[in-house]
Image: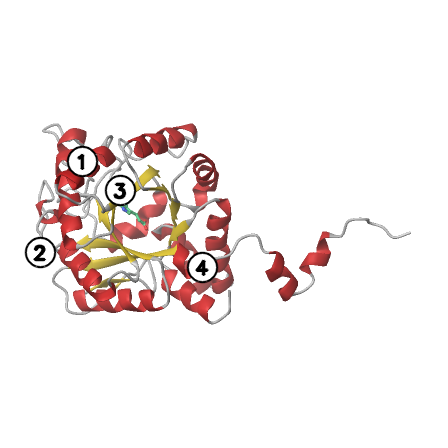
Amino acid sequence: MSFPTHRPRRLRQNAAMRRLVAETRIHPADLILPVFVREGITEPVALQSMPGVVQHTRDTLKAAAAEAAGLGVGGIMLFGIPETRDATGSASLDPDGVLNDGIRAVKEEVGDSMVVMSDLCLDEFTDHGHCGVLTEGGAVDNDATLEIYGRMGVAQAEAGADLVGPSGMMDGQVAVIRQDLDDAGHQDTGILAYAAKYSSAFYGPFREAVDSQLTGDRKTYQMDPANRREALLEVSLDLDEGADMVMVKPAMSYLDILRDVADASDVPVSAYQISGEYAMIEAAAANGWIDRDAAVMESVLSIRRAGADTVLTYWATELARWIKEGRL
Ligand code: PBG
């Protein structure tokens, strides 16, 4: 008599069998590449805490966008680093400001071959580094910030963004941006809402990437990592306000949230594999402690498996190349 009766190992016995029965796959179209463009530089600037990631010039930004598009990457998310900052982040509204100009450059370069997205937030533009404007007492003023977000959305749509990505976690931001886009005739510009964005220590390297001026934290507007139910509230509010897509951020420490949101959402769900997630894998691999490529693939695969339709990852272009080469 043969024992055991059930042998799940049969379907794991070689690579072809495992490939056949894999429940989750990564396709270049599922990936979104976050990129940084910095005003006033003539050569790209390498980021120490994110080996392999740079602050782009206008020209290298266009080249990076073209490369990603050529490999079939689904989208690109732009962040701008201005030369001068002020209390209200006014450079964000300048049609020729670094972010709006970058959007225009990328759109010219890639056309409709990939989706062009832009970060809609004030933190890169304010001299205090907060995602909104401040009251006299120094608190982040929700409703005064909304007024600027609405105008930023229009400026980004005018520059050519297909989707704007409000990431500031102000209450009501999606509704105001939708209204202002519609009033300006941009009915077809969509909103990828950073719906459940947590106040995370893993954003550390991003602060270097955007030369963040922040002292203190964002705990009065970003979510508390302790909370799960509240993510569904944030998502449902954003959907009511007209979000076309919703995002969970960060990804790796929030896979339970991602699963909840994927189960509840009737619009596409994104997850952002953030700077600290990237940095941890790169740093461990540089020390020879983990197999870099395998860890990169496993990390993105697990985010897809948890429920993300699309993944923002700094490895998007590299992963797309691996897929093309048949390594994935
Ligand atoms: C805020 C913003 C942040 C990130 C994206 N948009 C930083 C923050 O909230 O402090 C983080 C992205 C990353 O860490 O990769 N506009």
Which residue reaches farthest bottom? 325
Q: Around disc 1, counting alpha carbons within 10 Å, would you say few (fewer than 14), some (14 to 19), or many (20 or more)?
A: some
In the rendered structure, are the residues bearing label 3 and label 2 in contact, judged by CB atoms less than 8 Å apart? no
Q: Earlier in the sequence, mark 1 or mark 3?
A: 3
**Residue ID at (38%, 60%):** 316
Q: Position of residue 298 (x, y in %)?
A: 51, 56
Residue 27 — which label? 4
**Quadrant of the rendered image containing residue 173:** top left
Residue 34 — which label? none
Q: Around disc 2, counting alpha carbons within 10 Å, would you say few (fewer than 14), some (14 to 19), or many (20 or more)?
A: some
Q: Amino acid at mark 1?
A: Gln
Evaluate whether residue 196 shows in this view.
yes
Q: Nearer the viewer, mark 2 or mark 1?
A: 1
Reading the image, the residue beneath label 1 is 179
In the rendered structure, are the residues bearing label 2 and label 1 in contact, judged by CB atoms less than 8 Å apart? no
Q: Amino acid at mark 3?
A: Ser
Is ligand 1 less than 8 Å from the beta carbon at label 3? yes
Reading the image, the residue beneath label 2 is 96
Q: Position of residue 218 (x, y in %)?
A: 26, 36
- Drawn side of residue 219 relative to residue 10, left or right: left
In the rendered structure, are the residues bearing label 1 and label 3 in contact, judged by CB atoms less than 8 Å apart? no
Q: Amino acid at mark 4?
A: His
How far separated are the C-alphas under marks 4 and 1?
Answer: 34 Å
Describe the element under mark 1 as helix, strand or loop. helix
How far separated are the C-alphas under marks 3 and 2?
Answer: 21 Å
How far separated are the C-alphas under marks 4 and 2?
Answer: 34 Å
